[in-house]
Amino acid sequence: MMRLQATPASPRPAEHGEGPIWDAAAGELVWVDITAGLVRRGRVQGDDVLDVAAHRGGDTVGFVVPAAAGGWLLGAGAGITRLTADGEAHVLIELTGEGGSEELGGTRMNDGGCDRAGRFFGGTMAFDERPGAGTLYRLDLDGTVSTVLDGLTVSNGLGWSPDDRTGYLSDSGAKVVWAFDYDLDAGTFGQRRVLLDFSEDPGGVADGLTVDDEGCLWTALWGGGQVRRYSPDGELLAVVDVPGVENTTSCAFAGDLLVISTSRHGLDDDARAAQPDAGRLFTVRAGVSGPPANPYRGPLGALSQVR
């Protein structure tokens, strides 16, 4: 098993850093600060990432994907928002059955991504993380939003195998990563199996994930301070230690540079003092490359929800 160590990158810490992606069209690393409601953009320089800009995307922003028509599409609040290239945010749809305030036990978008065909998938969770309140939605290429999976707890990391035949989804509440048969033509998830089970793992639970060009999964461990690489059969191949940080949240490739997001959300004053780098991006040369984020290729207006 290979062991690597990540180093902190230059951008200022986020409160709840998440969801880095490589936007190939823009030539930028893009990530979010969930609780601050920000989309942040950076430029990769060597092994570092340098701040470029930050844009307000909503009260909360769970994840970001490129839009083929320009700008980005966000899982923000309890719906889907467009962020233009000049930083203007426009809510496209609020999802029925989602929403509500944190105090009233509402739900919010948490993580997602696009398949190779350009469909947008967004998963939700309750603010109080109650079991069964999470849902995975699909925004299809005709502008309709439908439910793909329900009964989730913390719908999290999402990815696909290089041949598009397998989809992967983390549920941090259930402490598992599932592998699904995936039909790219239809955009549907079929039979599922538990690929990784963290219920008895002292190293944390699976959070965001990415899939490299060799078809292996890299998953960040919330509470574990590391990222792990697994084969498609679930064999542990490598561990990336993220020193001095407890909560690693997600990861993505910019070529062969693995970029890791972290969080200080929920840490008390003592823990924050002990983890000054919490919330920062970290990077490491992984020895393997990964693909850029798939862009959303559907319409950016007149969205509707299928009930």
Image (tube, grey):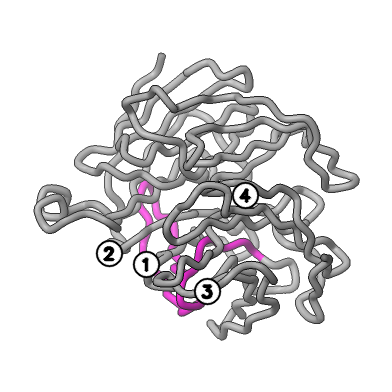
Q: Residue at x 59, y 59 (%)?
A: 23
Per the model, the C-alpha gap separating discs 1 and 4 is 19 Å
Q: Is residue 265 visible?
A: yes
**Vertical side of 34 occupied by 249: above or below:** above
Q: Quadrant of residue 227?
A: top left
Mark 2 crowdedness (10 Å alpha carbons): few <14, some 14-19, many ≥20: few
Question: Which residues fall within the magenta stretch?
Answer: 38-66
Q: Amino acid at mark 2?
A: Arg
Q: Residues within 10 Å of mark 3 (few under 14, many from 20)?
A: some
Mark 4 residue type? Pro
Type of the residue with mark 1: Asp
Disc 2 versus disc 1: nearer the observer: 2
Location of the N terminus (image quadrant): top left
Asked where in the image residue 232 lies, by quadrant, the reply is top right
First reached walking from the N terminus: tag 1 or tag 3: 1
Mark 2 or 1, nearer chain start: 2
Magenta-colored stretch includes residue 43: yes
User: Residue 270, which numbered label?
Assistant: none
Percent x, y of residue 292: 62, 49
Q: Is residue 16 left or right of residue 107?
A: left
Name the residue carrying label 3: 100
Q: Which residue is mark 2?
A: 12
User: Percent x, y for residue 135?
Assistant: 64, 54
> How far is the residue under mark 3 from the one under mark 2?
30 Å
